[in-house]
Image (tube, rainbow, N blue to C red):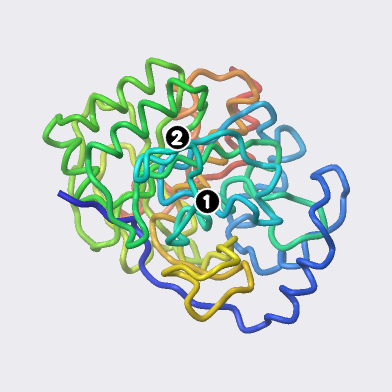
Amino acid sequence: MRRRPTTATFAALTALAVLTAAFATGCGSDEDDKPDPLRGQQWGLDALNMPDAWSRSKGDDTVIAVVDTGADLDHPDLKGRLVDGYDFVDDDDEPKDLNGHGTHVSGIAAAHTDDGIGVAGGAPGAKIMPVRVLGADGSGTDANITKGIVWAADHGADVINLSLGESGLMARLLKGGILNQAITHANGKGAVVVAAAGNDSTALQPYKVDTPVLVVNAADRTGVPASFTNFGAQNAVTAPGVDILSTLPTYTTKETLKNLSGYGKLSGTSMASPYVSAVAALLHQQGLAPDAIMQTIRDTAANPQKLVKLGLGNVDAAAAVKAAQNK
């Protein structure tokens, strides 16, 4: 059975001249304190109150494993942010992204920040571990996904992001299958597992209640549920997932057929999940254990109108980081 990432739509940016200029500035480091030229288009960071959270934590000494389609290993906004990963599709140690989805997810989580290039990442101090379990067409097997989760946990991942389709990942969790066991293994190794809810606009309880996973729904820029988001998972939270700007491969892939600028917008719970993985990284730096990280994110999420599709509510990074200081 084959699984696909949870991306709903793709929109290429038209301001290619701006993006080209961003590349020309060079890689730099996150200590350069040069504004990212595309930061103003990243509404999700502001919706999550990420800038306020960064004053207390940036996710230093945290590794976020992106179990996905791999990454553009030479992307200027990711190069230097990456630790060693693995490719379970081709069975080698070069998890190059031949689809585009994993590169986009990686940039949301931890692209270079304040280095004068492109976009900002949600956890500016964290590193990305690219683990390729999905092929060029965006599909993959349960076996490879399971291997990827276990490998990431066994190789030091502190947070594991799963931007995968609910028809694969979540159905297996519900049935108590091998992915459920892999997530439980990862939690036992000290990793927080964050999973996208899926994009079928469906209400479902997608996993066994005792599975240690944080499910993420998607919201638009007004804070209301995205039209496509799944909902109903117990203790799920919500994060921005519509028109999210991030990194894309600088070479031709499925997601970059008409856009080789290195950046673009995607929509889906796939985009919401790495934002929450970034918040988890901020809390990891503060010394919280996996269960405490998930609980803090849940406790500080806001849903004043009690909208069912928001679950416990929209994640607030600043509130979560502040609450962590009191634990």
Q: Nearer the viewer, residue 18 or 225?
A: 18
Secondary structure beneath disc 2?
Answer: strand
Please say if 35 is above or below 265. Answer: above
Q: Which mark is residue 71?
A: 1
Q: Amino acid at mark 2?
A: Ile
Please say if 301 is above or below 34. Answer: above
Please say if 102 is above or below 93. Answer: below
Taking the view exactly as shown, the residue that stands out farthest to the left is: 175
Q: Upstream in the sequence, badge 1 or badge 2?
A: 1
Q: Quadrant of residue 22?
A: bottom right
Whole-percent x, y for residue 72 in the image:
57, 54
Front disc: 1 or 2: 1
Q: Residues within 10 Å of mark 2 (few under 14, many from 20)?
A: many
Left or right: residue 270 versus residue 203 is right
Q: Which mark is residue 184?
A: none
Q: Which mark is residue 160?
A: 2
